[in-house]
């Protein structure tokens, strides 16, 4: 089974390994107190990294490897709920966020939980056991959410994202690309003759064709690219940092991998793809639906050109 799911955040039991904690806090005294609490309450179960600005914290998150985030909502470069929103938007796969807030900001902290934070702690009321317990519960809740989200977003047969997963995560990729002024390329792939395979050779062989298609796609693209089965015989890939030349390179590599599979033995037919591409320009942003429509139109135009040449 092909599986391009990002497993960031699928956290094991805190007792079996050291968890990396990112504290984004500009007050040196509060940061020192948190460090002491983690040492006293967690021993060597935690590795603490600190950032005194949101921008610095986002850079550390982008490097990966963070298990849980302790986030102060009041930072020199970001204030209030916007601080949390920026963390979620800039690093959507961030596993856990526990909000730290002052006593007067308790209502704000509740709003933060509603907006996506796992929990909140009020400064001045935190004790060793309370901090460790809140972090453990937050991590456990997140694990449950990962499982539930996977059930809703993953195609059962191929292990790729389904249409819902593609739309949900793809829209986040477009937002990030617009902010970072980074291009994307969408590759639309239609598996030819699936109905004929099902009707003449049986649905088991049809499933095999779909699984082989999924493997070809995951072998062709990077783990950071979004690969999905968005219809019965339709697949889509949203590749990071794409432009026109990259789109052409992707299709050439995809065709090469397809040819390699068809060169193998044991299949009474050859897999065949119809392919379309569309590029996302951060200087002229568009919605994901529009990008898919462009790629679909590109596929149709490619087929028309093939027919004219044949």
Image: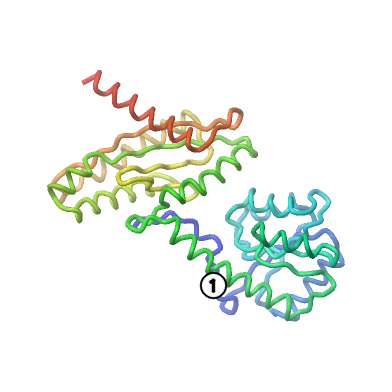
Where in the figure is residue 269, as x and y percent of width and height? 16, 43
Question: Residue 46, image x and y in percent?
Answer: 67, 73
Q: Is residue 284 above or below residue 149?
A: above
Relative to the observer, which residue lies in front, 65 or 192? 192
Q: Is residue 21 above or below residue 159?
A: below
Where the N terminus falls, by quadrant?
bottom left
Q: Tell me the residue at 56%/30% (across/down).
A: 281
Residue at (87%, 67%) from the top-left corner?
29
The C terminus - image quarter: top left
Instruction: Please report the residue visible at 33 percent of the width from the left and 26 percent of the height from the top.
Output: 302
Crowd band around label 1 with a 10 angstrom C-alpha radius: few (<14), some (14–19), many (20+): few
The reply, left or right, for residue 165 in relation to residue 260 is: right
Residue at 25 percent across and 53 percent down: it is 207
Q: Nearer the viewer, residue 296 or 259?
A: 296
x%, y% of residue 41?
A: 73, 80
The total number of labels drawn is 1
The image shows residue 51 at horizontal and vertical percentages of: 76, 58
Q: Secondary structure at mark 1?
A: loop
Q: Is residue 95 left or right of residue 239?
A: right
- Residue 80 left/right relative to 143: right
In the rendered image, the vertical position of residue 31 relative to residue 205, given as above or below: below
Q: Foreground residue, 33 or 63?
A: 33
Left or right of 305, for residue 169: right
Question: Where, by quadrant of the figure, is residue 193 drawn?
Answer: top left
Say which quarter of the image contains residue 34.
Answer: bottom right
The residue that mark 1 highlights is 12
Which quadrant holds residue 3?
Answer: bottom left
Q: Which residue appears farthest toward the top when viewing the image?
A: 308
């Amino acid at each position: 089974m092909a599986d391009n799911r990002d497993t960031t955040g699928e956290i094991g039991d805190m007792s079996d390994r050291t968890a990396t904690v990112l504290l984004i806090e500009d007050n040196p005294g509060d940061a020192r107190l948190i460090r002491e609490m983690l040492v006293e309450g967690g021993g060597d179960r935690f590795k603490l990294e600190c950032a005194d600005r949101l921008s610095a914290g986002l850079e550390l998150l982008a490097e990966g490897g963070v298990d849980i985030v302790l986030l102060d909502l009041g930072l020199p470069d970001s204030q209030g709920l916007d601080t949390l929103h920026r963390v979620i938007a800039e690093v959507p796969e961030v596993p856990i966020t526990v909000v730290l807030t002052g006593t007067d900001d308790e209502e704000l902290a509740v709003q933060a939980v509603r907006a996506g934070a796992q929990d909140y702690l009020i400064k001045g009321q935190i004790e060793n056991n309370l901090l460790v317990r809140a972090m453990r519960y937050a991590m456990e809740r997140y694990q449950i959410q990962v499982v539930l989200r996977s059930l809703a977003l993953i195609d059962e047969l191929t292990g790729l994202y389904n249409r819902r997963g593609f739309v949900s995560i793809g829209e986040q990729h477009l937002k990030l690309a617009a902010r970072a002024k980074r291009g994307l390329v969408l590759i639309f792939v239609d598996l030819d003759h699936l109905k004929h395979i099902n009707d003449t050779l049986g649905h088991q062989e049809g499933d095999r064709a779909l699984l082989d298609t999924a493997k070809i796609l995951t072998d062709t693209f990077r783990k950071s690219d979004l690969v999905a089965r968005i219809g019965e015989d339709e697949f889509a890939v949203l590749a990071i940092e794409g432009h026109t030349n990259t789109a052409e390179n992707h299709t050439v590599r995809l065709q090469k991998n397809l040819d390699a599979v068809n060169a193998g033995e044991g299949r009474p037919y050859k897999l065949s793809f119809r392919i379309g591409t569309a590029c996302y320009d951060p200087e002229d942003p568009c919605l994901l639906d529009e990008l898919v429509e462009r790629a679909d139109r590109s596929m149709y135009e490619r087929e028309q050109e093939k027919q004219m040449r044949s």
